[in-house]
Amino acid sequence: MVTAALKHRAFLSDFSLSAAVAGVIAVAVSFGGPAAIIFQAAKVAGLSPAQLSSWIWAISIGSGLTGVYLSWRFREPVITAWSTPGVALLAAGWAAYPYPEAVGAFIVSGALITVAGASGVFQAMMDRIPKPVVSAMLAGILFRFGVDVFGFLKSAPVLAGVMIATYLTAKRVSPRYAIVCTLLSGFAAAGLTGGLDFSSVHASLAVPVLTMPSFRLGAIVGLGLPLFLVTMTGQNATGLGVMRASGYHTPATPLVTLTGLFSTALAPFGCHGVNLAAITAAICTGPEAHADPSRRYVAGIVCGLCYLAVGVFGAALVGVFTSLPGALIAVVSGLALFGAIASGLTQAMEDAGRREAALVTLLITVSGVSFFGIGSAFWGLAGGLLADRVLHARRA
């Protein structure tokens, strides 16, 4: 009880507006664009509005509870989220399986993630990856977000121009609140240009819908196993890599184990997977959240609380995020990632002996190449490790 009280007082003293805004932006980015994939997958699967609302409730509640607890427990910004590659996988192949069979596949996938985390296999794998390779992967993942900031100068010149100018000015005058000022300027510019329209958003509480699973081999092999693989390689590996590149060394075992347990428990309500976040984690673990790394855990807690709010209000708050101009979300998230991109590039190239392996990782990740439904972040990591092994063997 005393420890909890001390932690509570520490949280209040560590709280900062910049960290809180980073947590809010992380959730906005999480639902702002990828939410469209959720609706597409739901349409493919023929889900009812109640089942869709339950799905959003489940992934949001799972992400919120795990994120708040882990950030509070380790005092580091542990950002958890729902699996975006997993949703893309569902959008492509869910139509072949009835909903109860898909739920059974979700349970199997969650159980496999739990075993991979609890056994220590995942921890051992991540401990053997050189830091420059991980940092290069991080820089490669985030690179396109930085490029998109300036790409919007063509399609949304007023909005993007105002936000970029505000960011640079605030960075000079008050660096700690640069992203806060940028977000406010984006809302102002969008409002003046008629880009904000919340007329179709209606507040409503989500009601979880329990579905009894059906375990069929076809769905387990065709849906459950691929979902497990893309979650571990495309989310958990890259998410832990983001934390490592930002200087956080939270043990992987409890993180992956807990997200696997929540994935399994919430699967009957539609949760396809809760895992470590990558891109949104970079927003909360980077210097833009707070100059002091020990106080960025506040961003993780605020992010989790925002996920819980989305879960309670279901599709209504998702509608709010999707109503925001795409340019606003893309530009503010890209600018919020500037520090993480710079840090990743610096750490990737600081070790002369591993500079070429890091470059291979960076270029493969940026290329966007994908094989077997697995994204370029994993292949960049694999290519960098292979290059590192070959180059060091040659030198030996």
Image (cartoon, grey):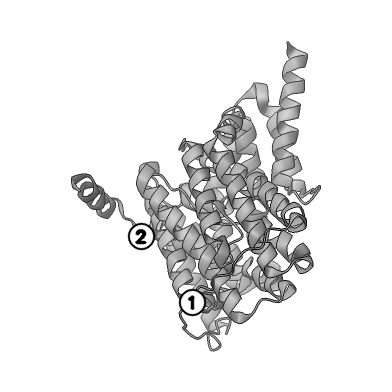
> Residue type at mark 2?
Leu
Q: Give the labeled residue for mark 2.
A: 17
The spot of residue 358 in percent (x, y) is: 68, 32
Q: CA distance from mark 2 to mark 1?
A: 32 Å
| Disc number for residue 93 | none
- Locate residue 73: give its quadrant: top left
Which image quadrant: the C terminus? top right
Q: Nearer the viewer, residue 167 or 46?
A: 46
Q: Which residue is mark 1?
A: 207
Nearer to me, 360 or 184: 360
- The kind of residue tagged 1 is Val
Circle 2 or circle 1, nearest the eye: 1
Q: Residue at x 63, y 57 (%)?
A: 106
Residue 225, position as x, y percentages in the image:
71, 49
Residue that protrudes farthest toward the bottom in the picture: 199
Residue 299 visible in image: no
Please report the residue visible at 74 percent of the width from the left and 46 percent of the height from the top.
Answer: 376
Q: Is residue 363 left or right of residue 153?
A: right
Secondary structure beneath label 1: loop
